[in-house]
């Protein structure tokens, strides 16, 4: 049996500093692996990554509050809900499922890494996958979120022949919206979304990140993703109606391609 439960949490401060963190547990046959990790971009744009195979307790989510502490990598944080959760079963067949629980599409986050504290808007999700890696239904993946004091935009876009996408603006699904190189078009009420100039967070083979989870199983877990590259960025971003800017926020987004 294959089961991967992965928590993802992030925060972007108003000055552009960013942290994204993972807590994951893998079961595959007799193999059992747990990991905690984070990537931190400081004010100078310097990246630092830390990980441990003894992460301790999973994140705790209750009453709109998510908390996680991982002393071995000197990370702790709290996320307080600013928007209702979103849940979808992205795939279900006789071989397994992909269940997505967007617990906190928009939250106020306070995160500490080492001796540095970050406060800003953050995001958290829990993904449970029981589908064997070789049967993942995409060969390219785009994911991201834009957060501001007023709005939360979240997207998942799979590419494997016909595209499959889920885009939510303030919790409402956007059936006609689609990604472009500049952002997202065809949101409801004549709205659109645009990225600003991005800062690089990660740009490397996807299997490199997977190896942080399970070095001995990395290529087996990666399956069809083994030949892809992971590209993660952070950027200022805007939500617009026509040519009028509705708000400014920060986006954190990635592509596997």
Image (cartoon, helix red, strand yellow):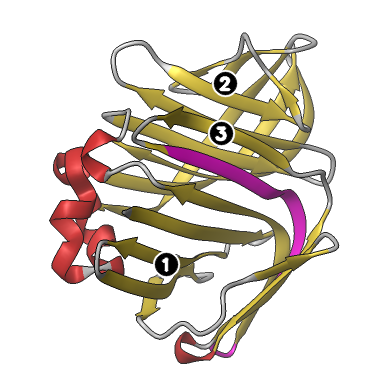
Q: How many C-alpha atoms fall within 10 Å of the one at disc 3: few (<14), some, or many (≥20)? A: few
**Residue with the mark numbered 3:** 89
- Circle nearer the N terminus (1, 2): 1
Q: Which mark is residue 25?
A: 1
Predominant SS of the magenta segment: strand
For this rendering, which residue is in front, 51 or 243? 51
Q: Which residue is identified by label 2?
A: 184
Labels 2, 3: front one: 3
State the image coordinates of residue 43 (x, y, percent, origin top left).
Answer: 53, 70
Q: Which residues are magenta?
A: 97-115
Q: CA distance from mark 1 to mark 2?
A: 33 Å
Q: Is residue 60 above or below residue 233?
A: below
**Spatial CA span between label 1 and label 3:** 19 Å
Looking at the picture, does residue 63 appear above or below residue 125? below
> Left of 110 or right of it: where is 88?
left
Q: Given this view, does label 1 or label 2 mark the residue nearer the observer?
A: 1
Please state if 46 lies on the left or on the right of 115 as rendered.
left
């Amino acid at each position: 049996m294959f089961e991967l439960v992965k928590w993802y949490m992030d925060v972007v401060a108003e000055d552009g500093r960013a942290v994204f963190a993972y807590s994951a547990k893998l079961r595959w046959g007799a193999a059992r692996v747990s990991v905690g990790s984070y990537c931190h971009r400081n004010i100078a744009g310097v990246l630092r990554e830390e990980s441990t195979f003894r992460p301790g307790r999973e994140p705790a989510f209750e009453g709109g509050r998510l908390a996680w502490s991982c002393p071995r990598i000197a990370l702790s944080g709290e996320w307080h809900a600013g928007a209702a959760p979103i849940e979808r079963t992205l795939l279900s067949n006789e071989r397994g499922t992909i269940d997505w629980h967007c617990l906190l599409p928009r939250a106020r986050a306070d995160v500490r890494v080492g001796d540095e504290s970050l406060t800003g808007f953050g995001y958290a999700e829990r993904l449970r996958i029981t589908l064997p890696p070789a049967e993942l239904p995409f060969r390219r993946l785009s994911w991201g979120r834009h957060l501001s004091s007023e709005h939360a935009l979240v997207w998942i876009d799979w590419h494997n022949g016909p595209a499959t996408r889920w885009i939510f603006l303030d919790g409402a699904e956007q059936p006609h919206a689609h990604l472009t190189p500049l952002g997202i078009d065809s949101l409801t009420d004549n709205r659109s979304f645009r990225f600003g100039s991005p800062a690089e967070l990660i740009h490397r083979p996807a299997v490199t990140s997977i190896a942080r989870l399970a070095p001995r199983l990395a290529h087996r877990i990666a399956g069809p993703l083994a030949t892809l590259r992971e590209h993660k960025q952070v950027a200022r971003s805007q939500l617009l109606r026509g040519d009028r800017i509705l708000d400014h926020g920060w986006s954190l987004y990635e592509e596997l391609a």
